[in-house]
Image: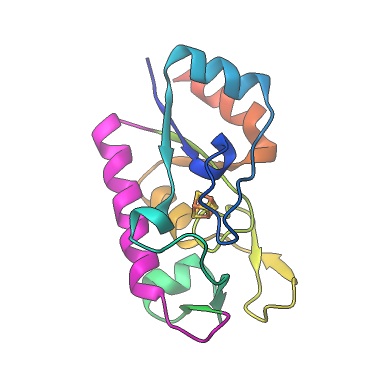
Amino acid sequence: MEKVLVSACLLGKRVRYDGGAKTLSSEILEKWQAEGRVVSVCPEVDAGLPTPRAPAEIIAGDGAGVLAGSAQIVDRCGENLTEAFLKGASLALQLCRRHGIKVAVLTEHSPSCGSTQIYDGSFSGTKRPGAGVTATLLRRHDVRVYGQHEIAEAQRVLEGL
Ligand code: SF4
């Protein structure tokens, strides 16, 4: 049975920067869990970052920029966390390879997991189109990445595999 990668915070794990979760209430997710399909990932915690931690945003770019070396990920205290976020993305890719994962449902707006929108780097709550570094790296390796609001689409793709 095909596995699916899901952001740990959507699964109720308290791994977000503020020490909380972002639990997704979804019959599809419950079904996947009952089927044993779900593989949990938190790229930031997996990379060794603490919880809670200062919020971080991508400065001057998006996940593609971070992978290209033209953008950086900095927390609100000004600490450059680019290397840790790249490590987290790489670990998530390894997890996908280990489990043969082709579909992921990741938390929207995160500098790691965001898949259609991220914060713009101003720490003002402003969003802009773009994807985080983990979502971008996984897509480059043929994993189809969806935000939590697109879980029905992810389910359709999973059924077609
Ligand atoms: Fe959730 Fe992803 Fe942020 Fe971890 S890195 S807290 S899984 S959005």
- Across and down, in percent, residue 45 comes to 40, 55
Does 101 appear above or below 108?
A: above
Residue 80 on the magenta span: yes
- In the displayed structure image, the side of residue 10 where residue 85 appears, left or right: left
- Across and down, in percent, residue 33 comes to 50, 20
For the point 57% across and 73% down, the residue is 57
State the count of labels: 0
Instruction: Classify the position of the C terminus by image quarter.
Output: top left
Does 60 appear above or below 34?
A: below
Q: Is residue 22 visible?
A: yes
Residue range in magenta is: 76-101
Q: Main secondary structure of the magenta part?
A: helix
Q: Choose between 79 and 129: the one closer to the eye.
A: 79
Q: Choose between 125 and 14: the one closer to the eye.
A: 14
Q: Choose between 61 and 121: the one closer to the eye.
A: 121
For the point 43% across and 21% down, the residue is 37
For the point 46% across and 67% down, the residue is 64
- In the displayed structure image, the side of residue 146 where residue 96 appears, left or right: left
- Across and down, in percent, residue 114 comes to 58, 55
- In the displayed structure image, the side of residue 87 where residue 38 appears, left or right: right
- Among the 4 quarters of the image, the one containing residue 9: top right
Instruction: Classify the position of the N terminus by image quarter.
Output: top left
Q: Is residue 159 visible?
A: no
- Across and down, in percent, residue 81 comes to 41, 75
Residue 94 on the magenta span: yes
Q: Choose between 51 and 9: the one closer to the eye.
A: 51
